[in-house]
Image (spheres, rainbow, N blue to C red):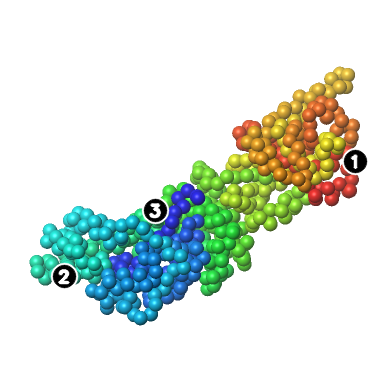
Amino acid sequence: MLKSDRNIYLHFFDRELRNSVDSNLTDAEAKEILLTALFMSSFPLYASFSNMYECVAAFPVAVKIAFECESFGLLRMLTNMRTSDEFLASRRSLYTFDKQRYPYYFTSDAPLWPQNTFIVHGQDTSSILKVEMAKEINCNIDFSEDTKFALQNYLFSGRQNALTFNAFKRVIISDYNQFKVSDYQYKKNILDIRNIISRQYSTRYLNILDGTIVTGIRGLNYYDHLAKDTFLTNIMLYSLILKPLFNIAKEDYKEIIQICVNNEFEVLHSLIHWITLGLKQITQGNIDRAVAILKAFNFNRYIIKNYNEFMAYCLSLNDYIIKYGDKLGGIEKMQTRILLVVATHMELKVTLEKLKKLGSISTVIGGLSYFTMIINSVLIYIVKCQMGQGGSGGAILTLKESIKLLKPDFVIMGGVAWGANKKEQKIGDLIISNRIWDYDIEKIKPDGTVQSRGTISPSSPRLVQMFEVAGIGIKDFKLNFGLIASGSKLLNNKDEVAVLRKLQPEIIGGDMESAGMASVCFREKIDCIMIKGICDWGYNKDNSNFPHQLVC
């Protein structure tokens, strides 16, 4: 569960609440809010079943979609009744005094009924609301003492009527006629009791699942204060972010529902949530500024035709928010970031082909060009350096720039390498560093012998442990953990390999870049490790090695 991720109560289906602020919300708007809210939380949405049932006439399309969402487990309908017959009987008992306002409970038609009702146990809603409404009425300075007494007397009179605005209105009208309350006071009392009823009903349902609400809905802003965080569920922000996706689906709401039940939805939700959290941090919760930032992101440059392209678009938007935040001094990290580094075009091509099977990949072209994707809510950056440690495009300078820009938590050097023990290793085995030896730095003595002065840097102990645990049960290839020889020489000489093995008998293989990674990550205090596949033995390299590189 992500930080600030909560159940969302669909308060806009409450007819009394909408009437309390004279909202003229349309069916089309309710439909859009409902579908947009599906992306605001990793939990199912929820609503009062009686509220939903009372909205059939006002929101026929939105209610239809709500029941379809319920059938897929995307929405829960709360009630304290167990069957449709029990529900209908209870509603008829509660609303006998007001049949004209609630005619749908008194027709002969069988009511709609959820496939999987969420039964609210414990004290019934009316009993709870009577106590809470009485407290609020008593604290309202705009009610006269006579009005307070009349309203509280109605609350605890023993009547089984529903606590609706219409019932309280009759009490206020009676008080108005009897005590000659001013017109202004009458109108103020009417408005106050409407708001009290709606606020208490919503609070009751919010408390059941510690939920929040969709904010920024046209005409319902008065109740935004009921939200746990008005920014993170703002309908305007999510509408802007999701606009390309909704354009793809057009009027087919079923396509949106299918996306929400897809196995990849958790990843998409995490990404969108990171975007909104990032926007909140860099704008300090200012909706107008956040909207301006989203509009500044050039949506039109992205031609989005399918879900994968929308994921890539969201990844780019997330990077845009991170960079924007860096200009303002940075934003709090909301995800684990892994920097995956490769050195050759072939390594990059194969890496991307493998990763594309797991999710969408976004391309970022600029001063530092890289690829971005999400796997299991982990943000992964893929960067290609040139072969070797040094040079303007080598591992050292590329890593320094990448770490400064992308701020990874972990760095992994992948690709292909040479193996050091042909008897115990085979092509396709993995060599994984627990230490990395920079063999480039050496002393040549007067007699021509060589003394190594290169640093031996430890790899991240926790990354080594992770790969040790992850490797248990792998049978197709062997995982070799040990000392890696790394230098800028492209080795293709058996004698040179023998010299390295003599200087450091423990080496299990080598490459040209990992020593550069180790030196930069040590200075930046970032966990790193090298993990590569054996494609040759450091000698007899020719075109016949290419298939081995593809295998690795």
The residue that mark 1 highlights is: 540
Residue 466, visible in the rendered structure: yes
Q: Which mark is residue 173?
A: 2
Helix, strand or loop at mark 2? helix
Q: Earlier in the sequence, mark 3 or mark 2?
A: 2
Of marks 3 and 2, the one in the foreground? 3
The residue located at (68%, 47%) in the rendering is: 383
- Name above or below for residue 483 compared with residue 312: above
The residue located at (50%, 54%) in the rendering is: 273
Q: Residues within 10 Å of mark 1 (few under 14, many from 20)?
A: few
Helix, strand or loop at mark 1? loop
Q: CA distance from mark 3 to mark 2?
A: 36 Å
Q: Position of residue 209 (x, y in %)?
A: 40, 55
Q: Position of residue 218 (x, y in %)?
A: 38, 66
Of marks 1 and 2, the one in the foreground? 2
- Name above or below for residue 411 compared with residue 135: above
